[in-house]
Amino acid sequence: MKSTQLGEFEELVLLIIGSLGEESYSILIKNELKDRTGRNPSIGALHSALNRLQKKGFIQSFEGGATNERGGRRKRFYSITAFGRKALDYSYELRSSLYQSLPKLKPTS
């Protein structure tokens, strides 16, 4: 069985791809990252994460049709796989469990 481990940046990218659905492409993912987290990764850093997620089997990609808007170039779209969703579920459960085990802090005066 493949590992379901995700790096923190990979997890954010995977969550955004999942929330955007089938219309996820790199510039939209980058803009969502900036809007939701305040991070503004380079497009190269984002593509590196997308490649890692695809190699791990967490996402799949396909090319859309060429458009005049993009000078005849195609967009690459990304979608989350069932294995990617399983990795997110595992990460969520692990983080929630660890958070629940934190002791309450005593008030300081």
Image (cartoon, rainbow, N blue to C red):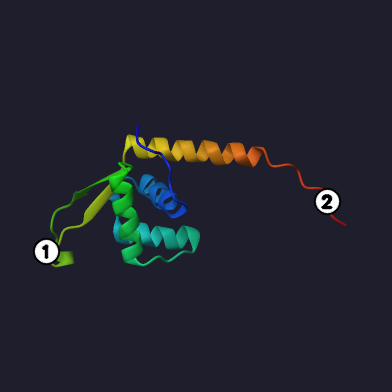
| Front residue of 12 and 52 | 52
Percent x, y of residue 61: 24, 47
Residue at x 51% of width, y 40% of height = 92
Q: Which residue is mark 1?
A: 72
Q: Nearer the viewer, mark 1 or mark 2?
A: 2
Residue at x 17% of width, y 52% of height = 64
Percent x, y of residue 10: 41, 51
Instruction: Decide if residue 69 is on the left or right side of residue 45.
Output: left
Per the model, the C-alpha gap separating discs 1 and 2 is 62 Å
Q: Which residue is mark 2?
A: 107
Residue at x 61% of width, y 40% of height = 98
| Front residue of 2 and 33 | 2
Percent x, y of residue 24: 30, 51
Neighbourhood count class around disc 1 (C-alpha, 10 Å): few under 14, some 14–19, many 20 upward: few
The residue furthest right is 109
Q: Is residue 23 visible?
A: yes
Q: Are marks 1 and 2 in contact (CB under 8 Å)?
A: no
Instruction: Decide if residue 8 is on the left or right side of residue 23.
Output: right
Q: Is residue 22 visible?
A: no
Which amino acid type is shown beneath numbered disc 2? Pro
Mark on residue 86?
none
Which amino acid type is shown beneath numbered disc 1? Gly
Judged from the image, the secondary structure of the residue bearing numbered disc 1 is loop
Q: Is residue 20 above or below residue 69?
A: above
For marks 1 and 2, the one nearer the N-term is 1
Q: Is residue 76 above or below residue 3?
A: below
Q: Quadrant of residue 95?
A: top right
Instruction: Decide if residue 103 is on the left or right side of residue 24.
Output: right
Judged from the image, the secondary structure of the residue bearing numbered disc 2 is loop
